[in-house]
Image: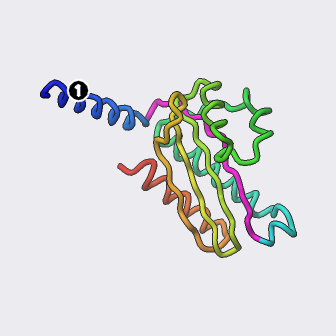
Amino acid sequence: MRSILILVVLVCCAAAARADDFGPGKTVAFLGMGFVDYSTEGAYDGARADQTERLALLEKLVKERFEAEGLVLVDVAPVAEKLSEITNPSQCYGCDVRLAKELGADYALVGAVNKVSNLILSIQLILRDSETGEIVRARSVGIRSNTDVSWSKGMNYILKYAFFAN
């Protein structure tokens, strides 16, 4: 019985160590942010330039923070053609993990903004282990108002409290 207990403790410690392996020096394939517009505005008017610019703003925030924390963002150019065929990399049935593995990255990172209306939006960011596909870090936050400030605050919250909460 004692040996079984010791084995269980060792397995749990190994799993916890792997989960805490995320940090400086690790490689991350950031495959970008998707945008899903559930609003009637999107159905009638299509993509808005300001929202497209905000997605680029969020991607910049993520890249800067990951690099500032000592993580290495791998070049995704080798999979750019495959990536261009994917509408939302955070909802592609594991393509994020497959692409990260193809790039030799330790982790796959994807995100998305979901718009219900100009008042109600949510932002999500998901980090998966490229070997196992398991979620290592993830968070989704609801934001109110469709502005640069609200989008930035939402992403900064995710980065501060779910990814780099030390």
Q: Which residue is pictured at 66% across the width and 55% down the height?
A: 57
**As displayed, is residue 76 above or below residue 161?**
above
Q: Is residue 101 left or right of residue 34?
A: left
Q: Is residue 138 above or below residue 51?
A: above
Is residue 35 located in the magenta-colored stretch of the structure? yes
Farthest residue in the front direction? 1
Residue placed most toward the observer, 86 or 4? 4
- Residue 62: x and y in percent read 58, 48
Residue at x-position 61% and y-position 31%: 100
How many numbered marks appear? 1
Mark 1 is surrounded, within 10 Å at the Cα level, by few (under 14), some (14 to 19) or many (20 or more) other residues, namely few
At a point 76% along the width and 47% down the height, the residue shown is: 87
Please report the bounds of the magenta region as a residue range: 24-39
Nearer to the camera, 46 or 94: 94
Q: Return the x and y of residue 152 as percentages of the image width and height.
A: 59, 61
**Does the magenta segment cover residue 48?**
no
**Secondary structure mostly taken by the magenta-highlighted segment of the chain:** strand
Q: How is the image coloured?
A: rainbow
Residue 65 relative to residue 76: left or right: left
Quadrant assignment for the N terminus: top left
**Residue at left 63%, top 67%?**
121
- The three-letter code of the residue at mark 1 reads Leu
Apparent side of residue 77 relative to residue 135 in the rendered image (left or right): right
Observer-nearest residue: 157 or 12?
Answer: 12
Q: Position of residue 72 (x, y in %)?
A: 54, 33
What secondary structure is found at the residue carrying circle 1? Answer: helix
Q: Which residue was labeled with disc 1?
A: 7
Give above or below for 33 relative to 14: below
